[in-house]
Image (cartoon, rainbow, N blue to C red):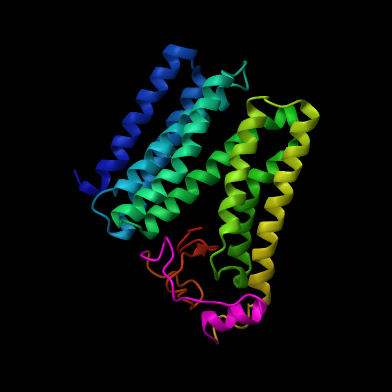
């Protein structure tokens, strides 16, 4: 067996064990098993493919943390799918989701501490985050309203748009606000799932969360549009300076993700900074 498949296959086995534990503790039904197994198989296949394409022989310590998060997300996915036919074990779902969200800070820290930051790990982390938000939106939509699906779908719509619009395939400069907004989505949706707030207040908080997401994506789209003719012609510093004349640009200090190579979906390297990919390929770091 190729070493490149050991990590993902182990993840699939642990995912099955988690589904079995949920079956024994909360009575996971057939729909949950189908959803959980489909998720686990897809996770194994996609992660194996990513490792093969990146040339990774094994998962890094940070990748293993992210895989643990992904397995918890698989449990949430199974429970969410099962809840369409009966009442969901909300407490268990909140616990699994909360641990997965907490570990989101651990994998990045681990990557930096061990010097194992990578394009694969960054992309893996982003996909797990995005899918968890989508699952949570699908779960709370029946009680809150279908409009909440916009939160979970926005990142996928953004990527789909990049398939059609060439100017959206560039690499974005780093912005910490993206990470803050992404974290807010998970926390707010977990609160909504746990029914911790009165219904009206839950709606208000979710609307505010969606507004933050629209602002964040809108700013990135605006930046890509503004610099669409510049990215192939001038340096990253010049592009950023022209797009944000009031914000001085400096690449002199290494950032947390500086060891991650350069994403080149548009000819720019963004040295010494993490990169956020907005195309089908490249780096996805915030």
Q: In this view, does 198 lie to the left or right of 261?
A: right
| Residue 81: % across, % down | 56, 26
Q: Along the line of sight, which residue is nearer the eye, 37 or 104?
A: 104
Residue 249 visible = yes
- Residue 181 in percent (x, y) is at 62, 50
At x 39% / y 46%, what residue is drawn? 107
Identify the residue at the far left of this view. Answer: 1
Whether residue 248 appears in magenta in the rendering, the answer is yes
Residue 268 location (% of width, % of height): 49, 77
Point 32% across, 53% down: residue: 113
Q: Is residue 46 among what the camera can see?
A: no
Q: Residue at x 74, y 45 (%)?
A: 208
Question: Magenta segment, which residues?
Answer: 234-259
Q: Residue furthest right?
A: 200
Q: Is residue 164 left or right of residue 11?
A: right
Please name the predominant secondary structure of the magenta segment in the image: loop
Q: Is 57 on the left-hand or right-hand side of 200?
A: left
Instruction: Point out the image quarter for the N terminus.
Output: top left
User: 50 left or right of 184?
Assistant: left
Furthest-bottom residue in view?
233
């Amino acid at each position: 067996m190729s070493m490149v498949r050991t990590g993902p296959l182990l993840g699939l086995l642990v995912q099955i064990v988690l589904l079995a534990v949920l079956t024994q503790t909360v009575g996971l039904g057939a729909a949950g098993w189908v959803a959980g197994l489909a998720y686990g198989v897809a996770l194994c296949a996609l992660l194996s493919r990513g490792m093969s394409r990146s040339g990774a022989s094994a998962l890094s310590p940070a990748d293993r943390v992210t895989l643990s998060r992904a397995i918890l997300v698989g449990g949430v996915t199974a429970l969410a799918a099962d809840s369409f036919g009966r009442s969901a074990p909300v407490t268990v779902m909140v616990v699994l989701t909360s641990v997965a969200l907490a570990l989101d800070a651990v994998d990045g820290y681990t990557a930096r501490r061990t010097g194992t930051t990578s394009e694969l790990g960054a992309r893996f982390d982003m996909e797990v985050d995005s899918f968890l938000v989508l699952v949570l939106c699908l779960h709370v939509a029946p009680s809150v309203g279908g409009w909440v699906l916009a939160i979970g779908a926005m990142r996928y719509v953004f990527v789909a748009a990049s398939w059609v619009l060439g100017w959206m395939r560039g690499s974005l400069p780093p912005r910490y606000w993206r990470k803050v907004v992404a974290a807010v989505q998970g926390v707010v949706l977990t609160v909504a799932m746990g029914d911790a707030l009165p219904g009206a207040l839950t709606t208000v908080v979710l609307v505010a969360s969606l507004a933050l997401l629209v602002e964040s994506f809108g700013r990135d789209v605006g930046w890509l549009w503004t610099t669409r003719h510049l990215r192939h012609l001038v340096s990253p510093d010049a592009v950023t300076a022209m797009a944000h004349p009031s914000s001085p640009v400096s690449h002199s200090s290494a950032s947390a993700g500086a060891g991650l190579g350069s994403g080149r979906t548009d000819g720019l390297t963004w040295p010494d900074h993490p990169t956020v990919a907005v195309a089908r390929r490249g780096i996805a770091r915030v």
